Amino acid sequence: MVIGHSLGGLVAIQTAATHGDRLAGAVIVDSPVRRPAPEAEEGTRGRAFRSPGVYPDLETALTHFRLIPPQPDPEPWMLDRVALHSLTHTAAGWTWKFDPNLFPHTMVAMNDQLASVRCRVAVLRGEHSVVVPEDTAAYMYELMGRLSPVVTIPEAHHHLILDQPLSFVSALRALLADWEHSVPAGRA
């Protein structure tokens, strides 16, 4: 079983497409697979994030942490914990655990990848997500052959694990419990 959120969900799709025969399933959490629009993609590829800043101390670095995309902040202690675990200390100072060069080298045809998955797969998305809006979720449902669940977490944004943790865990547990008792429909 592989479960991934955001960029991790795209990794989960690629893993399921490549190694689905060895997986119990994949859960894609608020990760978009959009309709192809080559003219729109050409100008944005590789520009989603700038190089991460370097800060002289941990406290300064923590003041620069933001959720991307922006959304209402969760409980301060949750945001602080995520921020703290998103930083690493280097010889130059404190910086984000993020490689801005990752995107230009990992862009693959996610549409084809998702359509080719043969293990169980499901999508969890936030009701107010700007990353996976309803039309994107509907497109993903079509790519999955209209056989896989697409579950919307009420009141959640993109970072649904932070802003609706109990609803997220409940939905995930229900999904996984059903997978243990049922036979996959037509994906193999």
Image: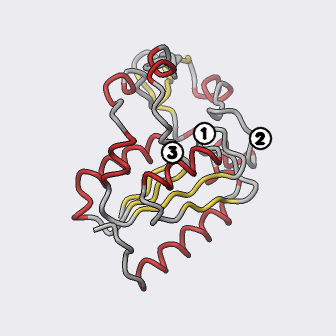
Residue tagged 3: 31
Its colouring scheme is secondary structure
Q: Are marks 3 and 1 in contact (CB under 8 Å)?
A: yes
Residue tagged 2: 72
Q: Residue at x 51, y 45 (%)?
A: 31
Q: Are marks 2 and 1 in contact (CB under 8 Å)?
A: no
Residue type highlighted by circle 1? Val
Q: Are marks 3 and 2 in contact (CB under 8 Å)?
A: no
Q: Whole-Å distance between the Cαs marked 3 and 2? A: 19 Å
91 left or right of 93 in image = left
As drawn, the label of residue 76 is: none
| 59 is higher (above) or lower (below) than 113 | above
Q: The N terminus lies in which quarter of the figure?
A: bottom left
Residue 57: image location, x then y, percent: 57, 22
| 96 is higher (above) or lower (below) than 85 | above
Q: Whole-Å distance between the Cαs marked 2 and 1? A: 15 Å
The label nearer to you, 2 versus 1, is 1
Secondary element under disc 3, as helix, strand or loop, is loop
Residue 181: image location, x then y, percent: 42, 86
Secondary element under disc 2, as helix, strand or loop, is loop
Mark 2 vs mark 1: which is more N-terminal? 2
Q: Residues within 10 Å of mark 3 (few under 14, many from 20)?
A: many
Q: Depth check: 125 or 85 in front?
A: 125
Q: Residues within 10 Å of mark 2 (few under 14, many from 20)?
A: few
Mark 3 vs mark 2: which is more N-terminal? 3
| 55 is higher (above) or lower (below) than 73 | above
| 151 is higher (above) or lower (below) than 103 | below
Residue tagged 1: 131
